[in-house]
Image (tube, rainbow, N blue to C red):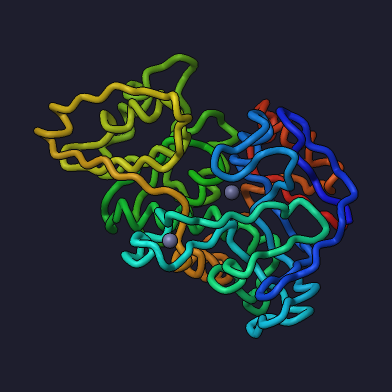
């Protein structure tokens, strides 16, 4: 079968690899839909991922597919079932899992390799994070379940209420999923974007308004006319927005660090303002099985429609160019990758 293999820095090749066979508890999917995400572009640029990927390795972690083969002991799925899965599964046994904080699992097991004709899903993911597609749910929408699960977990952490105002810093698909879900909850959301095109997509996805700062403009100046914010979500994973976020929250507000910064990033904070104005800094990483199920409900019911953030589809052979375009920011949204093309 054909599979996209990361071989190193900015090097992804489509290679012929053996078709996987499912062991006990495992299933092999024929991939119907896979989406790129910001993490894929980051991995392509760096040539590895500290926690998940050492080249040469298969990549791609947002997927929906059809069960092509089920291993011994798999009772929930059989050949021909259409399913969607998350990109990981927690162990269920460590202290963090037992507290319900599965995103902190000491033994989180990751799945990669969705940019391929077939994907082997490990037994733990089959058991805890693989779900049948609800009737009528398009696999291309379902493939966005993983990033949406992360967003739902982030929103739970920041707990915005109807009537509050949320500012989202970032114009990637994650920022725009925040806008959709917040609108569905009756929470006004303003998105700070990098470009006019992103600003228009933000409004299409549910943002009440969007702000595009001028080149080099201080974010506080850019947002001066936008009013005060109860919650500020940093969804760009950048030093500048991480440093600015607490200053953009109103007295008593919450800051949610959602986009992960690189390990060497350092920012300065104003602890006196955090203290005297009671500004809380929260963070959210990854998702839990509960949030994956909620995300599938959100896409299946149409509450979150990922289509406005998706680009023109490509086949496996178009993946490297798509990742290059994402790194160069000429491609802004998620690229649908269809291994059957
Ligand atoms: Zn992702
Ligand atoms: Zn665990």
Residue at 26%, 54% in the rendered image: 163
Q: In the displayed orientation, state which residue is furthest to the bottom.
A: 75
Q: Quadrant of residue 246?
A: top left
Q: Quadrant of residue 41?
A: top right
Q: Nearer the viewer, residue 161 or 244?
A: 244
Query: Residue 222 at x, y = what percent?
Result: 38, 24
Q: Nearer the viewer, residue 129 or 295?
A: 129
201 w.r.t. 100: above or below:
above
Res 341 seen here: no
Residue at 29%, 21% in the rendered image: 268
Q: In the displayed orientation, state which residue is furthest to the top.
A: 216
Residue at 33%, 34% in the rendered image: 226
* Quadrant, the N terminus: bottom right
Image-based side of 290 in relation to 306, left or right: left
Residue at 44%, 68% in the rendered image: 92
Q: Quadrant of residue 269?
A: top left
Image-based side of 252 in relation to 287, left or right: left
Res 333 seen here: yes
230 w.r.t. 20: above or below:
above
Query: Which quadrant of the render holds ligand 2?
Result: bottom left
Query: Residue 240 at x, y = what percent?
Result: 40, 23
Q: Nearer the viewer, residue 239 or 183?
A: 239
Image-based side of 110 in relation to 6, left or right: left
């Amino acid at each position: 079968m054909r599979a996209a293999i990361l071989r190193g820095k900015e090097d992804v090749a489509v290679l012929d690899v053996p078709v996987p066979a499912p062991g006990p508890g495992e299933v092999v999917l024929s991939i119907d839909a896979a989406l790129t995400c910001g993490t894929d572009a980051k991995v392509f640029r760096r040539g590895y991922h500290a926690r998940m990927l050492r080249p040469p390795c298969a990549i791609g972690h947002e997927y929906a597919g059809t069960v092509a083969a089920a291993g011994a002991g798999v009772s929930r799925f059989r050949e021909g079932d259409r399913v969607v899965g998350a990109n990981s599964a927690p162990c269920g046994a460590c202290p963090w899992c037992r507290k319900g904080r599965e995103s902190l699992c000491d033994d989180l097991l990751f799945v990669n390799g969705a940019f391929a004709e077939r994907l082997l899903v490990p037994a733990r993911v089959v058991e805890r994070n693989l779900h049948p597609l609800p009737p009528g749910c398009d696999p291309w929408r379902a493939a966005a379940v993983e990033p949406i699960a992360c967003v739902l977990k982030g929103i739970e952490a920041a707990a915005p209420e109807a009537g509050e105002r949320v500012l989202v810093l970032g114009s990637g698909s994650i920022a725009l999923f925040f806008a959709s879900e917040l609108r569905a909850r009756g929470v006004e959301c303003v998105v700070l974007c990098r470009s006019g095109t992103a600003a228009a997509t933000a409004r299409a996805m549910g943002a009440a308004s969007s702000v595009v700062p001028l080149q080099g403009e201080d974010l506080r100046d850019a947002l001066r006319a936008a009013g005060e914010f109860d919650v500020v979500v940093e969804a760009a994973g950048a030093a500048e927005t991480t440093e600015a976020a607490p200053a953009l929250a109103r007295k008593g507000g919450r800051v949610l660090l959602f986009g992960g910064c690189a390990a060497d990033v350092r920012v300065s904070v104003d602890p006196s303002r955090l203290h005297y104005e009671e500004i809380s800094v929260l963070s959210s990483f990854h998702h839990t099985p509960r949030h994956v199920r909620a995300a599938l409900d959100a896409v299946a019911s149409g509450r979150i429609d990922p289509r406005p953030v998706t680009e023109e589809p490509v086949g496996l052979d178009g993946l490297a160019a798509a990742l290059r375009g994402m790194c160069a920011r000429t491609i802004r949204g998620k690229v649908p990758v269809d291994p059957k093309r």
